[in-house]
Structures are given as structure tokens and as C-alpha cells.
Image (tube, helix red, strand yellow):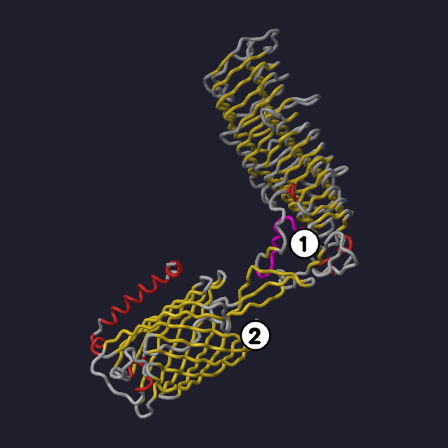
Amino acid sequence: MGLLRVLLGHGLMNVFRSLLLVAVSLVSVPALAQEPWVSRLAARHSIGDGVGYEDGFTSVDWFLPLLPDGDNDLWFADFRGLVSNDSEFSSNVGSGYRWYTPNQNRIYGFNAYWDTRQFDGFAFNQAGVGFETLGECIDFEANAYTPAVNDTNHRNLEVLEFAGNDLLIQTINALSGADFLLGYNIPAMHEFHTRVLGGGYYFDSSETADAAGWRVKLETAFRDWLSVSAVAQEDDLFGRNVSVSIELRKPIEHKSNAISSSMRHMFRSHTGGHHDDTIRHRLADPVQRQQQIALTIGTENATDMASAPLTFIHVVPGVAGTGNGTFEDPYGTITDAMDDLPLAETSIVYTPQGGTFTEPVTLASGTELRSNGPSQVINSLQGPLTLPFSGSSGDDLTALSTVINGDVDLKDNTLVHGFAITGTVSGNDVTSATVDTSRISQPATDAITLINSTEITLINLLIDQSGRGIFIENNGGTDLTVSVQQSSITSAGHAFSAVAASGSDLTVAIANSTATSTAGTGFMVDGSAGTGTTFVSQFQDNTVAEADTGGVIFTDVIFDAVSGGAPDPVSFSSLLVGSATARVTGNGISFTDTVGDVDMGNVNIFNETGSGLTGSGLFVSNSPTLTLSSQAGSTIDTIEGPALNLSDVETALVFDSVVSVDSSTEAAAFNTVKGALSVTTTVMDDAFNPPFRYEDILNPFTVSFGDTTIKSLQGSGGPGPVPDITLHNEVRVGNLTGLPAAGTIYSPLFIYQ
């Protein structure tokens, strides 16, 4: 049942179902039904190794006559399914023609096959042709095999190993080749028929050494239903091996009158007698050929995308002696590896055993510094390769197994990947540097500082207990692009700050990151001090968990998803600033002197006013070419400040809820605003000034506050508190419909014309 399940799992039942339909249709042909023929079913098990395979296999074979013209010739089809001992499927599908020449007392034949083989998840195909001649005493069989020209016959296995400074990949190759056997038929003894054969074979490919060897075979058959054979062979590629096979056969006969033959003693009689031993039995003998596609496993150097070999310098902390950076004799410090020039400038410096390195590290230009903590996947010409020994820490950045106690100095075209660093990561005038999947904790000052650098990528970082988290400053003459992805930053100062202070451009992209600042801003991008242009190309799915001087601050920036031409829209997708139990101090989100089309997506802001800070939930100023929108599900919840403080901007804002409590000024202020604002539920509680202030509104500007509750401590020019007022109807500003009369001394709505 186990074998049947394997065969079914590989679709063999579908193959045999199709063959059965073919057989039924062929048997129904009158010419076939009227002629004598022999079909054969066989099951075989082979033990041992062969040329290009190991551990043996089990096969099921169906030899099927096709349109015989008489008792002396035969067109046939041959179908075979094979399952290796490790449950991998192969098949042979072929056809051939045999004919008997009476004056030579000999059978001749030609055949052609299509072979398939599954191995380690790969599929191989080959074509084969064969010639055979069978006689009373002497048989000769020869075959040629070639992998399919449209198939990939050189495959890489996911088995890698280091040797010296190289990374070797195990490869598997399908071989072309040929074989032959010359056999002698020993006359039948009782009911046993025996052949002794000897010959040779040759297989090779462009990727491997050749296999030229000898082969001998002994085969004994009992009647026409049991055969046992043994094969011994040897060559320089596969070595010497022996296999033994046992085969059960079931002939299925349709015959007219028996025809005698001078080859009678060679027939494999299924009854033990000789009365039915005719030429048709020999015509139906099994085809002798190699049933498994010949495969060989070798090694090759892993190469980069430019076909240059990938090289590695290995470092193991505390290794005694000088070492030479090979896998067998590694360096003991990262500094020694970086001093191995020029090899370090083109290599991956790798720590296969992890450990702690107590040293400052200055990278060599062009090098990659990788640890065994995270899974290290290298792009290569052979495809993505996972380095041996990597992945020991999994995805947990708090459990990284390789530690650097010291500062790390980046250089041009460098990478740091997979380290726990208790120091500062810095770079000055660096071109193209990446810090990936690392933890930077407890540095003396800032965690990451990059000055006047270009093409900086920061991915999957955990930064905690630092001065500032990430500080980017561009005060040189070169454009800078910085990308922060999937990172968590905890700091005393600004969690992330990018400042332009020169005539060159600065481009910032931040996504899937969390900022926590106990005494600074969450995310800040400031281009006001530079004469160049500061772009924000991405700000997506970010969170500010804590901030003391503002959650997200953009000053003098252009939002542009694709640089060049008119600014392309930028979507935040989602943004969370603070929470109901941990509010951001200062402005929740601030846009000043900003250009572009920004969709904040699902934005939720929780903030409060701090000492000396205004503390608006959403603050926009002097941004007449900014279009700002949000999506349903958004909220603003502000304490001691306006929930909305918008001026010089066009809006398409949608909020489920807008709340301002105890504002020292207005609860919502609009100055020179156009567009639309739609709120489902609005609460303005205890605003010191009139809760709503509209000034210099540009038509059209439509506001819908939905269900609105207003409580003002002081009216417009009035001394007192006013009664609570709840509005349940839409309020429109622009055409000024639906509002209480302007200028009422205790009105909670304060309108400047």
C-alpha cells in the first residue's frame, strides 16, 4: 500500500489509465486480434548502486504489442514506472520494432525511449535510442542516451560548504552517454535459462569528469515468470558497484497455431515445456537498457551576479594564532579581517560561530560584514544562497549571537548585517552603506550618525537607550538618499532626524518603523536650513509610541514618491501617533512649508500640549501647494490644544472622531483653507477661546462635523462660559449656511470675514 500511494502521488495511475485505453483500442483492431502476440507485465526490484543512481528502485513494466504483421516481427510499446528507495519517481516510455530473419536465425531490433527522473525536487528528461540483435547463442545490445536539449540538466542543490575562502555549491548533472553488452546464452538446463554478458559504457557532461567503465552481467530465468540478475561495474567517476535484481513476469498470450523455430532452446517457456515456445516469445523479451537517467553530484564555486567567485574571510573570536581568514584557519578579530587587503575589499567577512568581539571596527571599503545570527541569504548567479551556519538567532533581534563591543565606522559600499552593537555606527562622506537586521544599544551618544553621505539604507534595526536614534545631516555638496525600513528606535533625543543644511538634495524614505523618544521628536525631516531640496519619497505604516517635542514633524519638504517632474502622490497607508494612555507631547503631526499630495491614510493621533509647546493634533502652516487627505477610521484626540490647526492648505480630510479637551486656544482653527473636512463625531470640550475659528476661508471649503458637542469657557469677546451646545446637523463653511449668527457675544463659533 505504501508503494501504491507513492505511485499514485506521482500520477502513475493516470499514466496507466491512458495506456489501458490505448491497449483496449489496439486490441480491438481486427488485424491485431487475428495475429499471434505476447504481451508482458513485470514487476522488478533492484538492490544496490548503479551508474548515476544509488540505493536501488522498484519498477512496474508493461510491454505491449502494436500491430504485428505476423509471427516473425513485432511493433511494440513499452511503459515503465520506477520508484526509488527514497520515494522519487522515474519513468521510461518507448516504442520499437523487432523482426526475425530465418536464414540467419536471428532477431534484429531498434527502439527509442523518453525517460524522466525526479531527484531532490528537480525533474530531468532524456531521450534514448537502442539497437539489438538476439540469436541462438550470441546477443548484442547497445544504447545511447542524451538529456533533453530543452531541459536544464545542470541544477544546484541546497547544499553549501566552505572551503578556504570559497563557498562551494553541490550541483547535480544529467549525463549523456552510451553502453553496450555482448552476451552468450547458455543452453537451457531443465527449466532455467541463463545468459552471461559483458561490455562497457561511457557517460559525461560539460560540468563533470567522464565515466568510462566496464560492466558484466549474469541473468537466470525460471520459465517465463521469474528472472534474477546481478551486475558488476566500475569506472573512475562512480567507482565499483554491484546491484542485484529480481523480476516477476506475467506473459499474456493471444496465439494461433504454434510455429516451430530453430531458436527453440532459448525460449523462456512459461510452462516448462516446449510446445508453445515460438518466435513471438523471444520477440517479447524485455528491452535491456539503463532505466534510470544517469546523474552525478559535484561542486562548483558560488559566483556573484557578474560571474566572479564569491569570497569569504572567516572570523572566530579568541582564535589562537595569526590565522589566515580561511574557513579552516580563521582570524581572531574583525580588525585582522579588514586588514587583509585587497581581499577584504571584495569579500564577505563572516562570523560562522558568532561570539563577542571587543574592538572598534572600521570597515574596509567594499566589504560586507555578516554574522551567523540571522539567516544570511546571498544573491548569486546560481540563485539565492543561504550561508551555512546562519540563522542561529532566528528573527529575534534581542537574541543576536554575534556582539561587537565598540564603535563601527562605515565606509563606501559596505554592509553590516546581523550584529548586536554596543557602540555608535557612523559614517562621514560615505557612499552607499547599509546596516541591516542589527541591534544598537547603549551607545555613549547617538546610535547612528551619518554626515554628508549618500545612499544610506537602514533595515530591520532595533535601537535602544541612545542619545538620538538616527541622525542624518547633509551639509556637503552631494545628494543624499536615506531609507529606514522595519526598524524600532528608542532614544532620549529625536528618534529619527534628517536635516539638510547645504545646497544638495536630501531624500528620505521611512516605512514600517516605530519611534520612541523620551525627550525629543519621533520622526523629523527638516530642509529649512539648506538651499537644496528635501524630499520625502515614502512614509508608510509608521508609529510614534512616545515623543516629547512632537510626533511627526515635516518642515520645508516636498512629498514626491518618484523623483523628477511634478511631485507624485505619497500615501502613509496608516500612521499611529501616541495612544490614549501614552500621548505624544507637542504637535501630533506637523506640516510647515510643505509641497505635494499626501494621503495620510488611516491616521490616529493622540497628543497633548507640553511646557512651551502648542500641541495641535494636526498642524499645517504655509503650505498652499499641499493637498492633505485622510481616510475613514482616522481619529484625532488632543488635550490642552487644538485638534485641528490648519492654514494655507487644501484638504480632503475624513475622520471618524475629532476631540479637543481643555484647549488653551481654539479647539479647531482654519485660516485660508480650501477643500473639505468630514467628521462623524466631534467633541470640543472646554476650549478657552471659541472652539471653532474660521479665518480667510477660500471657497469652496466644506466642513461636516456630524454629531458635534461644544462647550466653550469663553465666547468671542464675552466674559463668561457659555452653555453647552450640541449640533446634530451638517455645518458648512464657505457659503456660511447652517451656522448660528456670527458675532453673537457668547457664540461658540468665531468667524472672521
Quarter of the N terminus within the rendering: bottom left
- Residue extending farthest bottom: 103
- What main secondary structure does the magenta stretch of the protein show? loop
Q: Is residue 98 above or below residue 171?
A: below
Q: Which residue is mark 1?
A: 352
Give the residue type that dot 2 points to.
Answer: Leu
Q: In the rendering, at what x and y percent does residue 332 appear?
A: 76, 54
Asked whether residue 41 appears in the rendered view, the answer is yes
Q: Is residue 404 above or below residue 697?
A: below
Asked whether residue 531 appears in the rendered view, the answer is no
203 with respect to 194 (left or right): right
* Residue 373 part of the magenta-drawn span: yes
Q: In the rendering, at what x and y percent does residue 169 appear?
A: 60, 63
Foreground residue among 159 and 658: 159
Which comes sooner in the sequence, label 1 or label 2?
2
- Residue extending farthest front: 190
Q: Is residue 324 above or below residue 45?
A: above
Foreground residue among 571 and 13: 13
Q: Which residues are magenta?
A: 370-382
Check disc 1 and report its element: helix, strand or loop.
loop
Give the residue type that dot 1 points to.
Answer: Pro
Q: Which residue is mark 2?
A: 237
Look at 47% across and 62% down and name the residue there. Answer: 86
108 with respect to 256 (left or right): right
Check disc 2 and report its element: helix, strand or loop.
loop
